[in-house]
Image (tube, grey):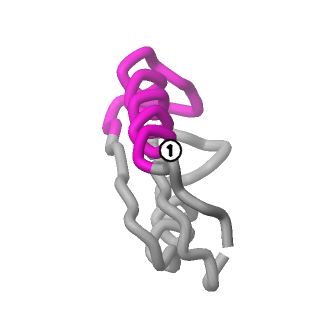
C-alpha cells in the first residue's frame, strides 16, 4: 500500500469495532495519490447512504476523467 499512487476515497466510522479509526487512518496516511477521507463520528461498521453516494460520485468522476486516456 505504501507504493500505491492511485486515487482513493475512504470512510471512517469513529465507533467502528471491526476497522478501528486508527487503522483506517494508518492506511490513509501511507497513500501517495489524491485521496479523500469521509469522517463519520456516529458511524460503526456500516455504509450509510451519504457515504455510498460519495463513493459512487468519486467513481463516476474518475471514469469521466479517464475517457479517451490511452493506457501505458
The one of 57 and 48 positioned closer to us in this rendering: 57
The one of 46 and 59 positioned closer to us in this rendering: 59
- Chief secondary structure of the magenta span? helix
Look at the picture and state if 6 lies above or below 37.
below
- In percent of width and height, residue 41 lies at 32, 38
Q: Residue furthest top?
A: 49
Q: Residue at x 58, y 32 (%)?
A: 45
Q: Which residues are magenta?
A: 40-65
Quarter of the picture holding the C terminus:
bottom right
Horizontal side of residue 64 vs 27, given as left or right: left
Q: Secondary structure at mark 1?
A: loop
Q: Is residue 53 magenta?
A: yes
- In percent of width and height, residue 16 lies at 54, 40
Q: Residue at x 51, y 79 (%)?
A: 30
- In percent of width and height, residue 57 lies at 40, 30
The residue carrying mark 1 is 67
Residue 14 at least partly seen: no
Q: Residue at x 51, y 74 (%)?
A: 31
Q: Is residue 54 magenta?
A: yes
Look at the picture and state if 59 lies above or below 22.
above
Amino acid at each position: 500500500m505504501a507504493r500505491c499512487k492511485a486515487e482513493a476515497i475512504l470512510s471512517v466510522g469513529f465507533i467502528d469495532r471491526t476497522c478501528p479509526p486508527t487503522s483506517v487512518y494508518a492506511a490513509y496516511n501511507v497513500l501517495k495519490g489524491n485521496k479523500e477521507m469521509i469522517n463519520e463520528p456516529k458511524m460503526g461498521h456500516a455504509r450509510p447512504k451519504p457515504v455510498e453516494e460519495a463513493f459512487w460520485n468519486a467513481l463516476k468522476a474518475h471514469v469521466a476523467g479517464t475517457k479517451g486516456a490511452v493506457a501505458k
